[in-house]
Image (cartoon, rainbow, N blue to C red):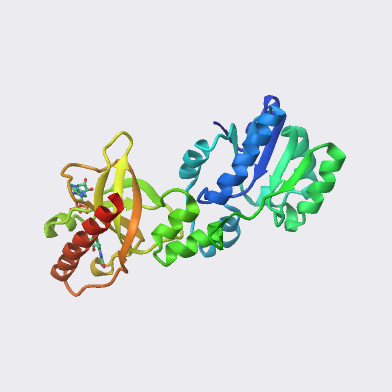
Amino acid sequence: MELIRGIHNILPAHRGCVLTIGNFDGVHRGHAKVIASLVERATHFGLPATLMTFEPQPQELFRGDDAPARLSLLRDKIALLGELGIDRLLCVNFNRHFASMDPEFFIEDLLVRRLGVKYLVVGDDFCFGKSRAGNFDMLKKAGERFGFAVVNTHSFTVGDLRVSSTAVREQLAKGNLEQARRLLGHPFTLCGRVAHGQKIGRTIGFPTANIALKRKVVPVRGVFAVKLWWDGSDIYEGVANVGFRPTVNGQVCQLEVHLFDFEGDLYGKRVEVELVAKIRDEQPFESLEALKKQIWNDADRAKALLGDDAG
Ligand SMILES: Cc1cc2nc3c(=O)[nH]c(=O)nc-3n(C[C@H](O)[C@H](O)[C@H](O)COP(=O)(O)O)c2cc1C
Ligand SMILES: Nc1ncnc2c1ncn2[C@@H]1O[C@H](COP(=O)(O)OP(=O)(O)O)[C@@H](O)[C@H]1O
């Protein structure tokens, strides 16, 4: 998969494609279905399957801290999309300038002149450009004028639940990791680099790898049974907390993982943490001793849950 970073990096050689546009946050099963049909069309036309996405996500630009919790960071998205057979990923820097683009200019300059789109898949509620005045009907009409097909994405359901990034966020917020995994079609993971903490963990017999989450809003909270790995490593099992650590006066929301069968140095490693099942909500403890006792219980519970998961 070729990554095109920013519209200024679209080259004349990139002209001619089948295209889909969206946030693709989480890259869930609904997204996978849209992409599968895009790839099929790409084969049919003999053109590259191209996906346009935005970074930051538009809501993050417009709503800041009030934006919905991000399911996947760009890096995770790139990895997940790369597995789905896309040829090109165009990542647009979503800033005020781009957001205020005239909708006709978006179509004629970007879609037609520079990308040479032949087939376009978008949701029928897709809006774009200045004042969000560009919509599906406008794209359809432009398609007739410039000779490209425009189709809308269909809802994909699991059971009677419509798969959407919002539905995944709701399941995660409730701690339903298994249902979230069903909607996503892959496990929910958090990635980041292991940083130095307050060095309290090891003094209570639970060294914890501290992982900065780089998100304004985190979609999960609490204590979880987890699996952790990094590039080329084994998979380790453990117990983790996502939260503010009220007992030690934590200031930022952070992921902390204690691994069961590991001794060594994780500082600086970029790790991936799969949240397998939720154990409890985070709570303040009156002493580190009380917290330590609770973490013993959490570790037992996590081992049992991870054992069930393996079976
Ligand atoms: C399984 C687990 C559960 C935790 N639960 C809580 C909790 O309920 N409340 C809390 O304040 N901190 C909780 N913590 C965070 C601890 O306060 C923190 O890991 C510990 O102070 C070590 O900090 P350090 O890594 O900066 O040394 C939990 C940590 C782990 C690994
Ligand atoms: N079993 C383990 N689980 C997690 N981290 C471990 C483990 N064994 C050793 N470590 C190392 O110890 C560090 C955590 O120790 P800790 O005292 O909690 O310090 P810090 O506050 O810097 O996280 C981790 O970042 C990792 O490098």
Residue 214 relative to residue 261: left or right? right
Relative height, residue 179 to residue 230 (above, below): below
Extreme residue toward the right, this view: 145
Which image quarter: residue 63?
Answer: bottom right
Residue 226, percent across and down? 30, 53
Residue 214, percent across and down? 42, 52
Which image quarter: residue 251?
Answer: bottom left
Residue 145, percent across and down? 87, 40
Q: Is residue 110 visible?
A: no
The N terminus is located in which quarter?
top right
Which image quarter: residue 172?
Answer: bottom left
Residue 310 relative to residue 61: left or right? left
Tell me the quadrant of ligand 1: bottom left
Relative height, residue 111 to residue 24 (above, below): above
Q: Is residue 120 visible?
A: yes
Extreme residue toward the bottom, this view: 286
Q: Residue at x 16, y 63 (%)?
A: 296
Q: Residue at x 50, y 40 (%)?
A: 78
Q: How many numbered tags mark residues here?
A: 0
Residue 274 relative to residue 35: left or right? left
Residue 35, percent across and down? 60, 42
Q: State the residue in front, 71 or 195.
A: 71
Residue 129 relative to residue 59: left or right? right
Q: Residue at x 48, y 41 (%)?
A: 80
Q: Residue at x 41, y 50 (%)?
A: 187
